[in-house]
Amino acid sequence: MTASPAIRRITLALLLAPLMLWLGLLVVIPHIDMLLLSFTEKTGVRQYQPGLANYRTFFVEPVYWTIFLRTALMSILATLLTLVIGFPVAYFIAKLARGRSKAFLFLLCLVPFWVSELVRTFGWMILLRETGLVSGALQALGLVSGPVELLYNDAAIMVGLVYTSMLFMVVPLITALDSLDDSFIEAGYDLGGSGWSILREIVIPHAMPGIVSGSIVVFMLSLGNYLTPVLLGGKDSLWFTGAIYTQFITRFNWEQGAAFGMLLLVLSSLIVWLGLKLSGQTLSRTVG
Amino acid sequence: MTAAPPDLECRAVTKAFADFVAVRGVDFSVPAGSFFSILGPSGCGKTTLLRMIAGFADPSSGEILIKGRSMREVPPNRRPVNMVFQHLALFPMMSVGENVAFGLRRRKVMPAEITRRVEDVLARVGLAGMSGRRIEQLSGGQKQRVAIARCMVLEPDVLLLDEPLGALDLKLREHMKVELKKLQSEFRTTFVYITHDQSEALVMSDTVAVMNHGVFEQVGSPRDLYFQPATAFVAGFVGDANRWQGRVEALSGNAVSIRTEDGLVLRAHAADGALAASDAVAVFVRPEAITLSREPAAMLGLDTGIAATITGILFNGANSRALVKVAGQREFEVAIPQTGAFAGLSVGDVVHLGWRADQARAYRAPRP
C-alpha cells in the first residue's frame, strides 16, 4: 500500500471504531459505574458515603455466599456434564460422519438456537411439569400412580443448563477434533493402542484447547444464566443472578446489586483461572 | 533351507468398493528380511493393499498371512506389523522418547525397560540422547528416523512404509533412500514399501512389484523390471522410454521387424509372447540404450541404425538428453554420454543412432 501514514491511521481508527464503541459504551463504562456504585454505602435517604459495606454483606451473610457457592458448583457440574455429553457428539460429527451427513448433523445441533431461549425453556416446562408430557407418559405406562412434578428441582435446572450450553461446547470441540488427522488415530492403533488409550493419550490432548475454551464459555454462560434457573428451578432455584436481580429490581438496592455483580465477575474469573492452572493450560494457548 | 513361512504372504487378495475394485486378486510373498516395494501410479490400489496388511481395511476376499498366521479378524493393534505413515503421524503432544515409548507402554513393559529400549533404538537410528526433544524441533530427516524407531522398538515381523519420503525435498530424499536401505539391513526386518517414485523402489528394494489398476503387472528384482519389463505398462512406467506405435512387418521367433506409424523401421524383441504379422504393437526403447555417434560406422553390428538430426539439447548433467528427429517423423530422446565426446553437440547436427534388437521391446498394443 502506498497510502500515507495519516490515511493509514484513519483507516485503522475507522476499522476499530465499532469494536471500541461497543466495548466502551456497553462494557467498560457500565462496569466503571458499577464499580463506583458498589463501593458506595447508603446511610440514609439520598445519603451516601464510600465504603465496603456491600462487600462485607456478601461475606458476612451466609445466605449470599452459600448461593454463590451453590451457583458455582452447579455451573461446574453443568460444564462437566456438557463436556461428557458433547464430546462423543463432537467426535462423531468431526471424525466419523462424512460429507452431507456431517453438515446435516452439525445443522441439527444448531437448529434449537433458531428459537429464543425463552421459548426453548418453556418447551422443557411443557415436558416436565406436573401435567406435562413426561408425567403423562409415565402414568400411561403405569410406572407411577399419580402425576409427578419434575420441575422446580436441581435436576431440572441441570437439564436446562446442559441443553442451553451444548452448542457452545460442541462447536469448539468439533473445530479441535477436525484438525486431528486420522493418521494419528490409526498410528495409535497400529502401535498397539486400545480405543481408550488412544482417547486418553492422543485425542484428548489434541482436543484440549477446544475442551478448555468450550468449558470456559459453558461455565460462564451457566453462571450468568438467569432465565433457565428461574423458570425450571422456580423460586427456590437460589441462583446468584437471581440474587443480583432481587437487589436491583425488588429491593431497589443498586449498591448491593453492583457489589454482587462485581463479585460474580471477579470470583468467576478466579474459578476459570484456577481451572486453567489445574488442567495445566494457558489462556493464550487456548485462544491462539 | 528350512520350511519357514515367508514373513508376509497375500493370497488372491481382492478389495472391492461399491463402485470399483481397488485391488484385484493380488498374490505375493515376501521372504524374511527382504526389502519389498510396491510401485505404482497414484490410484493403482497400493495404499489400499498396504492398509489391508496393516489391518485398517479388510479384504473382500483372499487372505493375508504374516509368518504363516492368518490375519483374518485380527485388529490392527494385535498384528505383528507396524506402519510408517505417509506424513509420519508422530504425536505432536509427546516428546521423541514418549512417541517411541508409546507402543511399549501399551504392552505394559516395565518403565526402566522402556527407557532402556527407547534409548537403544534411538541410538540405532542415530538419534542418541534426543528423547527429550519435541517433535517440532526435529528436521525432516530426524522425524523420519523417529517414525521408524517408533515402529522398530516393537520388533515387528513386517514394517510397512507408506511413501514416507514423499514430503522431503530432493536432496534429503536421495539421502534418506540410502539411509533407509542401511537401516533395513541393520535391523534385518522385512520392509514393505509403497511408492510411486520408481527411483525409490529401484534403489532400495530387493524385490519390486509394479502395480496398476489393482493388479501386479510384474514382480521381480529392480534389474528385471528395468531390463526385462513383462508388460507395456512396466516398460513405460519403470525408467524412461521412447515409445512408438506400429505394426509387425516380419518376424522370426522373438525377433520382429516393426514399421512405426510414422514410417520408422526398427528391429525389436517380442517381449510378451508370440506376435503375428500385422499385429499392432507398442515398442519401447530406453534413451540410454541408444548408441549415439557421429560416425555411421559405429552402427555396424547393431540391429537398427538410423541417421537423425538433433532438434534440441536437454542439458541435465549426467541425465542430459538430445531430442532427435528423422525427417517426417516424431521426435524422440537419446541419452548423451557425458564422457566429453559429445560436449560440442548442437542443434542441427546429424548423428547416427542405433540399438540392438533386444533393447527395443515390442508389446502387443492394448486395445484402444
Image (cartoon, rainbow, N blue to C red):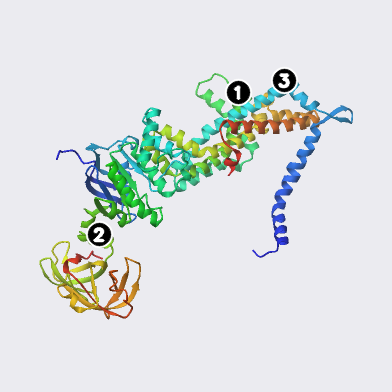
Q: Which callout, 1 or 2, points to the residue nearer the camera?
A: 2
Label 1 amino acid? Glu
* x and y, in percent, of residue B101 in the image: 40, 35
Cα distance, mark 3 to mark 2? 85 Å
Residue type at mark 3 is Pro
Task: Give the residue number, with chain letter if any, for mark 2.
Answer: B234
Q: In which quarter of the image is residue A130?
A: top right
Q: Is residue B171 above or below residue A202?
A: below
Name the secondary structure under disc 3. helix
Q: Tag 1, which chain?
A: A
> Mark 1: few, some, or many residues within 10 Å (few <14, many ≥20)?
some
Parent chain of label 2: B
Sequence-earlier tag: 3 or 1: 3
Q: Which residue is drawn at 75% across and 29% down?
A: A246
Looking at the picture, does residue A288 appear above or below residue B361?
Answer: above
- Up-down relation of residue B258 to residue B34 (above or below): below
Of residues A173 and B289, which is closer to you in this image?
B289
Q: Is residue B264 above or below residue A221?
A: below
Q: Quadrant of the C terminus of chain A?
A: top right
Q: Is residue A125 left or right of residue B70?
A: right
- Residue B52 in percent (x, y) is at 31, 43
Looking at numbered disc 2 in the image, what kind of residue is underneath it? Val
User: Which residue is denoted by mark 1 in the rendering?
Assistant: A149
Picture quarter containing residue A47? top right
Q: Check residue B74 in the rendering and tell me which mark sits there, or answer none.
A: none
- How far apart, in angstroms, are the residues tagged by discs 3 and 1? 30 Å
Task: Determine the CA span between mark 1 and mark 2.
Answer: 77 Å
Name the residue carrying label 3.
Answer: A62
Q: How crowded is mark 2: few (under 14 residues within 10 Å), some or many (20 or more)?
A: many
Split into 4 quadrants, where in the image is the N terminus of chain A? bottom right
Residue B18, visible in the rendered structure = no
